[in-house]
Amino acid sequence: MEVNKERVDIPIAVTFRGKMKIVLLLAFPAVVENFFQTFIGFVDVYFVSKIGLAEVSAIGATNAILAIYFAVFMAIGVAANVRVANALGAKQVERARHIAQQAIILSILFGILTGIVTLFFARPLLTLMGLEEQVLDIGENYFRVVGIPSVFMSLMFALSANLRGSGNTRAPMKVSILINIFHALLGYALIFGFWIFPEMGVTGAALATVASRVLGTLLLVYYIQRSEVLAFRKDFWSVDWGHQKELATLGSPAAGEVLIMRAGQIVYFGFIVSLGTNVFAAHQIAGNVEVISYMAGYGFATAVTILAGQQIGAGKIEEAISFTKIGAWMAVGIMGVLGLLLFFLGEWAGSLFSEDPEVISKIGNALKVSGTFQPFLAALLTLTGAYQAANNTKFPMYLTAAGMWAIRTVLVYYLGITLGWGLTGVWIAIGIDIVTRAGVLAYKFAKGTWMNLEKEAEVESQCHPQSIKETMSDCVNNY
């Protein structure tokens, strides 16, 4: 088996400067990966904006529903990432491999289920958004093409998370770059028509997205098989209810957190839709521009989750705290700079998507607000990653529920509709929610009450030597 040389291993003694370098080694590929992952949506919106704002609104509404799917897929990925990192930190390689494969099984199951939901309920789900009939028809078509083969989305989340949990953030980055080049070229050809490809509009955008995810899944499997830590074992494909329970215990609150957020988004998206199709299109475009900034935060959050998870697994709590602080402050600095770019270049970015002066102005105002809050978003993302690494996914879920429903949704309606501040009021409400949640997480982190280090189950109870063809002594050593 080929040895994987892309993992980042942590030396026994690391200086502050050395820790910064390690964070960057893990964060940079994750930032690039996340950037290119979201660039798929960015390209779709950019190309489709050349067709019309109704099409932009249709894709935005569909993505709001798909984000609920992503919540489940992401939760499986979070659980896999943390459990794999914890196991490897404790030098339990076969346990890490077993959990990684069980996460893939779980992702396939949920990918199939969400595909079935899309097949039968695509239009009813979009109807909840209160869309105009024209936008609804376009959205339904896009939703069916992208949502029915959801299993490839799910697999990409799980496979990437397994690689990142093992310390390999470069492979997912490479895959993201390759599939985005593929997606951009195929998307252009299918949307506008080129050479042997017919002009298919929004349907072409959807087909290009699905094709890129199929390719991404195949490439990630290739990198998994190259890994000395994660390469598949045939006898690990049987469902292991112990590991499934571990994944569910850690992943369920993470899923709940994102589901609560997405459900709240659907509600306040309805408020924005009531302001007009052009306003909602401006909101979607602003969000697609902003995503370039907060993908940096997600990259550093990935690094923090991996490093804190490995250190916690090894029983080095102070090192976990140290890596978290370093990662958080680096993210705050970088996203602060990106926030300035959003503030000053927002209208210019908006002009790339629309020629309507009113729409461009709304995009610019939204991004000015967004740029102001980027450092707080950086803290929120990285600290959430640390909580997840410490097996504490419940508190971020509760905090998200309070922030989304008691702050964000209420203020979106009050500022955006009641006071008549429109889209600017919507983004101010979002920013207030971000600042509040970041402050609470930082307070608990400083107080030292952010960990949930429950006692692991006895290793013997997690071993099944008769099914994995090893002796009990090997089982104990491996797990």
Image (cartoon, rainbow, N blue to C red):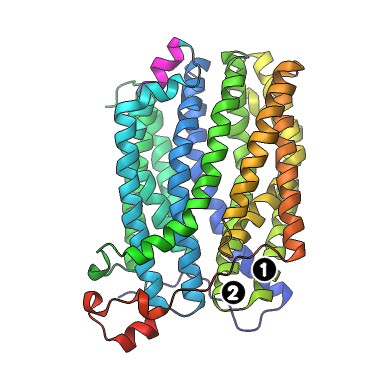
Q: Is residue 414 left or right of residue 474?
A: right
Find residue 425 and report its image quarter. Answer: top right
Magenta residues span: 133-140
Rounded to the nearest whole Å, what is the CA distance between mark 2 and mark 1? 9 Å
Whether residue 357 is in magenta: the answer is no
Q: Amino acid at mark 2?
A: Gln
Q: Amino acid at mark 1?
A: Phe
Please state, as top left, top right, bottom left or bottom right, where the N terminus lies in the image. bottom left
Judged by depth in the image, the label closer to the viewer, 2 or 1, is 2
CB-based contact (under 8 Å), mark 2 and mark 1 = yes
Residue 17 x/y as whole percent: 72, 73
Farthest top residue in view = 133
Residue 402 x/y as whole percent: 66, 41
Residue marked by disc 1: 323
Secondary structure under tag 1 reads helix
Residue marked by disc 2: 311
